[in-house]
Amino acid sequence: MSAPLEGVRVLDLSEGDGAPFCAMQLGDAGADVVKVEPLDGDWARRLGPPFDDGDGPLFMGMNRNKRGIALDIEREEGRAVVRDLAASADILVECFPRASDAERLGLDYGTLSAANRGLIYCDLSLLERRGPDADKPATDLIVQGISGLTRFVGERGKEPLRFGSNYAGVTAAMYAAQAILAALFWRRTSGEGQYVETSYLRAMIATQQNYLAAHSDPDDFGGPFYSAHLRPQERGYPTRDRNIEFNVTYARDPHLLETLLERVGFLDEVRADPQFADRRLVAGDQAALRPYLDRAFLGHGSEELLQLLDDLGVMCAPVHDYDSMFHDEGILEQDMLLTVEHPARGEVRTFGLPWKLGETPGAVRLAPPTLGEHTDAILAEIGYDAQRIAALRADGVVG
Amino acid sequence: MAGPLAGIRVIDVTEGAQGPWAGALLADLGADVIKVEKPGGEMMRRSGPLKGGHALPNAGLNHGKRNIVLDLKDPAGREILLRLIRDADVFMENWRRGVSERLQVDYDVLASINPRLIYASASGFGQTGKYAHKATVDYISQAMGGYFSLTGPEGGPGERPRFIAIDFTSPLTFVQAILLALLAREDSGRGQWARCSQTETMIAVGAVRAAEYFASGATPRPWGSASAHVVPSQAFLAADGYILVECPTGETWRALCETLELPGLADDPRFDSNAKRVERREELLPILDQAFLRYSGDRWLERLEAAGVPCGPVRWDIEDLYDEPQVVANGLLVDREHPEMGRVRTNAVPWLFSRTPAEYGELAVAMDRDREELLAELGVRDRAAATAAGDARR
């Protein structure tokens, strides 16, 4: 076996900015993922430029290792096709916009599990399926705002900032994948599928567990860690080329700050400063030494400084952008840049697998599908003959 | 226990967040997770804020686990770990490179004792290669993983998200790797070495920006609150403050124009697709900015929501979560009691299962609390071993 989920069939009914990532992770682990899209495609395809063969990054980043079928889910004939696909699926992933959509479409867990009791049905909503905001339209950015992630970036009173990249949706998708895999594990012994759910909001609250606990009436709020977001913005130490970050807190060498300053030629100047004269420099001095370090580092290249810090046993890293990161030997050694061939798209670059499994490694086998790329093959696999497929196509049910 | 992993035993020697949170999630899923802690306690025992002398963050980070203290440098302590390994399904570690070999509990050693064992290793920057030896903390990993470059004011160089963005996502990859290895074992009958790193997770979290880079060839840049490839998707200044608005589809764009009382705009051929809006954002945004200034944020949110446009407020304080109606209605925050700390606020379990409910276990217990119980389970009753074990205690 070359991948842990070989032979597992996933039906991905999701569109947009989170749930597709969940299905993709199952595909990375070897599952056969069938992505069902509307006839005009997942809305994420249209979100660009940049476009890769017509499809935007939100689509390209979340839909590798899937085959694609296009059909009209708003028509009963289209829904019948989905039910047929669900009958032989092990896992279904959906993120319907409204709580009532699944039942309205006849694609709810009750209906589908009646025909397939082993089905694991995963509902990944943005704001949970109950409560006053269950049907509120939302996206990753909106959940970032509600859950308070935006407070960790930017500056109070100014324009709020977006937090990283699809952070809420991807995190929720990773939690959803856990629920699915755990349910699959339980099914091996019980034979029973089940309904599992999570949401972006639920995931963003779990993600803030340290902050929730830290704010539980502490005796002393203590160090600055949990109020770091109230301090000024920070982007590392500039050097001659790119910024670097380092943290001396956990290093063991008691003289490392002296050695560092000496090596960059600033020890004498620091010693002339009364606050640092005649005493050993300690980890807590890193912040106060900042003005010296900033000037000192500008005379040196990042690679030289990182090597020096590394030799001193100090935690450090370049402040990468994506271009420098995907050219960094140390990143490439982790197989984090891959290419995959696609008949229409040609060679597509993608990021590597986020885990490394020694015996069942998984692989990136498929670039994201073009719209309806595998419609015929997928329908043939569930027993539709060529005539029936042609009729569905002529009738505008599949594309 | 009723969770989907009932019957699975996990030995967790991890420290910090990446490993401990992963272990806690496995416990929520029903596994019997035994935290093996070093004498004196792991770093999170001392990481405040404190309450009654105990570290609050650790209470949640290590919930749901039994606890035994073992000095793995001591042969007696190591011997007890090896006994635990014999009946375990999963071993989790996040030591610096070289430690597992030094302690003689590396993959080869443990797999020879228990070939069904999943040996799960989490690291900062991988197990092999140029960076494998490096220790890290969250923001150092964010720097390495390109995350500073994605966030910040538009046109600027980017900034560090002052949040532990990787400490609570890397455990998710860790759990995923472990679950996949458990599933693979169902077929093969054998365990394996499952590895993951913080950079690998950080790059996966940035999947969409990576795709942007691969498609355009240009390194992704921060866009303030906005998006490189969706317009509009950003904060707008209403009469009394900022709100967030996004139109990912043609329908939501049309609904926005109607709500803003800009009827000609929806059909304006300059802006009638997302691609055109991205290309002409400089032309479009002043029109929208002007319109949003007319009413208060709340008034816009009410109207936009009714029109089906994704929108929401910006919350600036953790306290805002406590009475957020959707959070309250779904019980997403749970106050739990700790015998010494009293009330500790925690998250609800991050998933719901219809047949095998996940359950948030006991808040982190005292060091070594379950020693006697565990030794009894292992059948370590002979005086010599018990004495040796007692000596290993500090």
Image (cartoon, rainbow, N blue to C red):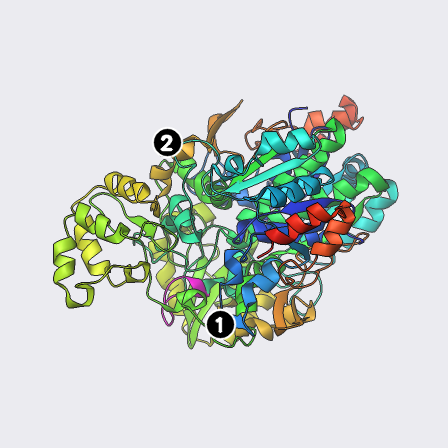
Looking at the rendered structure, whether the residues under marks 2 and 1 are on a common chain is answered as no
Residue B23: x and y in percent read: 63, 50
Answer with the quarter of the image where residue B135 lies.
Answer: top left
Say if the magenta span includes residue A154: yes
Can you identify the residue that label 1 sits on?
B317
Range of residues picked out in magenta: A151-159
Q: Residue at x 74, y 40 (%)?
A: B87
Quadrant showing the N terminus of chain A: top right
Q: Position of residue A382 (x, y in %)?
A: 78, 28
Relative image position of residue B85 (x, y in whole percent)? 68, 40
The numbered mark at residue A329 is 2
Is label 2 or label 1 in front? 2
Q: Is residue B96 above or below residue B116?
A: below
Q: Chain of mark 2?
A: A
Q: Main secondary structure of the magenta part?
A: loop
- In this figure, what is the number of numbered marks? 2
**Which amino acid type corresponds to the residue marked 1 in the rendered image?**
Asp
Q: A155 or B54: which is nearer to us?
A: B54
Disc 1 packing (10 Å; few <14; some 14–19; many ≥20):
some
Residue lying furthest right in this view? A114
Q: Is residue A23 visible?
A: no
Q: Are marks 2 and 1 in contact (CB under 8 Å)?
A: no
Q: Which element type, helix, strand or loop, lies under badge 2? A: helix
